[in-house]
Image (cartoon, rainbow, N blue to C red):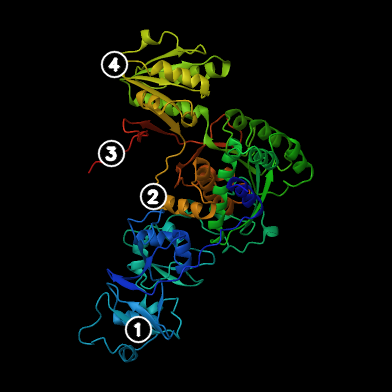
Amino acid sequence: MKRVLNLIIILFFVISACAQNTITKSTEKVVIDGEKYYLHTVESGQTLYSICKAYGVTEETVMEANPELTSNLKLDQVINIPVERDISEDGSKIIYVIKKGDTLYSLCKKYGLTEEEFYEMNPQVNPRKGLKTGKEIYFPNNTEEPDVLDTADKDTINYYYHEVAQGETFYALMRKYSISKEELLAANPGLDENALKIGQEIRIPKDGSAILSDENLLIDSLAALNFNNDSILVDSMNICDTANWYSYGNEFKVCLLLPFEVGPNLRNLYNQEVGNREQRLYLLTEKIVSFYSGILVALEELKEEDVKIDLAVYDIGKDFAKLSELIDDHKLDSVDLIVGPAFKSQVVYLNDNLKDTCVTIVLPFVNDVEILEKYPNNIALKTTNDKIYEHIGKYAAQHPQNKYFVIQGTNDVQQQAANEIYNIIKYGSDSSLNVTTIKFNGTSLVGLKSVVSKETENVFILPFSNESSTMKIFTDLFPLKDIEVTLIGSNSLMEFESIDPNYYRKIKFTYYTCQDIHYSDTLTEIFISKYHDIFLCEPDEYSYSAYDAVKYLIPKLMRHGKGFAECILCDDKITGITGDIDFSHKSDYAKKSYSRSSLYMFSLQEDFEFVKVYPESEIIDD
């Protein structure tokens, strides 16, 4: 059976990581700048994820040790794998590499040895010359490393001392104390960042660190809070306050309502196979599967943080039949979070009939303002049109020298959109901008040649994305000679296969999107590596969006409970793979309904590279 058919079956009936080739750990080691590394040579079929799993280290640690490394590994490539804990072959000794700042006293105290015992175990160390950075020394492996520092040794002038609570992670400490990984490890020699222990005491340098208030702290896990849910009464007016943070535990029920269309796709794929045609899913299903795949990668990471998610996935098709059945059978009762549906009509039906009016509904594809204005507890992951128009107005205000044309379509919706953009550009800033509407009659732009200017850049704004209409507009703009033209439109325009790529370049196509993905960023590369490893294909904008949504929303669910939507504007904004994750609530929105606020614009250059033109990078003066 074809690969695409296997993908559907895997996604719906086997949610697990693919089996990996057995990886043999290298025995070859080197010391670089006082740090010990295994030298691992990449073999066929190995991925960064599988290699890290074999050595028991994180992908982030390996990426930091190999700055030139990317997620696309090459055969016979040599990678430095940090040695987290090195034990002698007979298992009797801990092999330790001396680091800058280590003292004999501190190390002996750490490993429970007297100085005499140390020299007996390390005859190669000359007592007169002391410890030398980068050299190997040995400690017995039959004693446990002490977790808590002796009170007499505490330097309370230069350090805070933090006792690790249940569920806390290394990176939670970094965020809480606003400290880098390097600073935290330097203050705690020998600290294993992947194996913190309850009650372990961590030293936090006071110089340059600042304890964040609880209001600004993003908690990794609430496993440390042993609340009895039956005995807690939470006032809906104050659940965002620190004193009222609560949880159902660290286990949540998330419901996914999306139109996978498994039955129709299987029938269609079968017919394609019988007809000896190229097999592929419906375009909508491909997007839904990509979104679902991004969710699975994020949930897999949350498992490592001891977060338990009961994920119920329903293929609800395109109508109301399955939704009605789920509601009538009480399948959506006591759900902590709902993701979907994908169509506006289904979103309206769900909001009108859902019995649990407190649960938050996350809308991955629907960004209709009317939904947010009418129904509470709805969060649109995509930027709504009104916010898009506001950003386009800000872009125009930053470039007042241009001449702007808003393309007015043939139907009421297209004409209303053109009027809104025109009014925002014309009256939304203090500058006197040159803006007009230009009509598209269905076949061409009316009076185009008589209105464009040769003295300045002509910026056309296209607020709709019909393929045949867009093609005709492109063919109108393409022949203009000695005239500088830019066309601003949705990133969906690039999916149109009927348009010659040279058209995009000639009219300096500039697309807007709510995503700004930095592919060279370490976190992005790690996500791509995991995605490759599990699904054997490239992630797309829907995969990235799903991953960020889970990583953003689940911690808020853990922090504030089921009513977390009320607290979204109280929490800090964070930066995810897709850029700044920030949501806004307008005065005409229903209570606890939000839309994503961010928007980015990218312009195509002569070399077919896209360059971000909005928002402009901030220039920091010395």
Name the residue rendered at 37%, 31% in the picture: 603
Earlier sequence position, callout 3 versus callout 2: 2
Which residue position is annotated with label 1? 138
Q: Quadrant of residue 190?
A: bottom left
- Using the numbered discs, state the Cα–Cα distance from disc 1 to disc 4 in whole angstroms: 76 Å
Question: Does label 2 or label 4 sit earlier along the sequence?
Answer: 4
Badge 1 local density, few (<14 within 10 Å), some, or many (20+)? some
- Mark 4, Cα crowd under 10 Å, few <14 / some 14-19 / many 20+, is few
- Report the front residue among 463 and 282: 282
- Which residue is the site of mark 2? 521
Q: Which mark is residue 189?
A: none
| Three-letter residue code for mark 2 | Asp
Which residue is the site of mark 3?
619
State how far apart marks 2 and 1 are (Cα): 38 Å
Quarter occupied by the C terminus: top left
Amino acid type of disc 3?
A: Ile
Nearer mark to the viewer, of 2 and 4:
4
Q: Residue 178 vs residue 197: left or right?
A: left
Residue at left offset 67%, top offset 38%: 271
Please indicate whether residue 188 sits to the left or right of residue 292 in the image. left
Which mark, residue 482? Answer: 4
Relative height, residue 76 to residue 139 (above, below): above
Q: Position of residue 43 (x, y in %)?
A: 42, 63
